[in-house]
Image (tube, grey):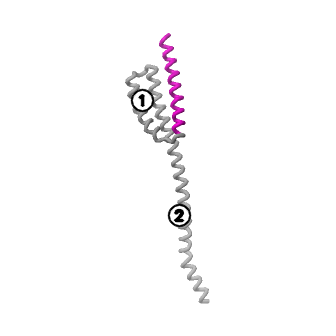
Amino acid sequence: MKIRGFFLYCSMKITPILLSFIALAGCSANSTNTTSKDSAALDNTAKYSMVDSAKMMLDSSDFYMRKGVKKEISQEATREKVHPFMENFQRIYTKLSPSDTAVVYQYRIDALNKLIDLQVEETSKESQ
């Protein structure tokens, strides 16, 4: 009877310690996996947001370039409006990976082609 009481007493003292140790080990293993997954997700988000930011800078400068082509604002005003956007674009563009650079470069070429088409249309309107 005394032995059974001794085991019961020891199990009551050791069980909380063992459970705490198991829970602590399980939480630390889980947190390292979660951290690596979270950091990978943040890296992807940062990468996509950099591409989106570069495209946004191009779109903003394109907006003012179109106004300049349509002669809604002066050439000087166009330069003043476009310059900050293009400086930000260059800063972002240099930080992109080569694959993202190719995507943004193609986007820029497409936007420039549309701008050239607009300029040709505006020139033909003026000559008539």
Residue at image x 55%, y 58%?
A: 33
Q: Is residue 106 magenta?
A: yes
**Residue 81 in the image, given as x and y percentages of width and height:** 40, 29
Tell me the amino acid under the disc marked 1: Val
Numbered range of the magenta stretch = 100-128
Q: Count how many numbered circles sit on residues in the image.
A: 2
Query: Horizontally, is 4 left or right of 87 in the view?
Result: right
- Identified by mark 2, the residue type is Ser
Dominant secondary structure (helix, strand or loop) of the stretch shown in magenta: helix
Asked if 67 appears above or below 91 in the picture, the reply is above
On-image quarter of the N terminus: bottom right
Q: Is residue 63 above or below residue 27?
A: above
Report the front residue among 67 and 99: 99
In percent of width and height, residue 75 lies at 40, 22
Label 1 CA crowd tier, 10 Å (few <14, some 14–19, many 20+)? some
Per the image, label 1 sits on a secondary structure element best described as: helix
| In magenta stretch: residue 88 | no
Look at 57% across and 85% down and name the residue there: 6
Read off the residue under disc 2. 28
- Which residue of the protein is positioned furthest toward the top in this rendering? 128
Residue at which label 1 appears = 82
Query: Residue 111: x and y, percent?
Result: 52, 28
46 in relation to 114, above or below? below
* Residue 78 lies in quadrant: top left
Cα separation, mark 2 vs mark 1, equals 51 Å
On the image, the x and y values in percent for residue 20 come to 53, 71
Residue at image point 43% right, 22% down:
68
Residues 16 and 74: in front is 74
Which quadrant of the view contains residue 4?
bottom right
Do the CB atoms of the residues marked 2 and 1 lie less than 8 Å apart? no
User: 64 left or right of 27?
Assistant: left
Q: For label 2, count other residues whose C-alpha is less than 10 Å away and answer few (under 14), some (14-19) or many (20+).
A: few
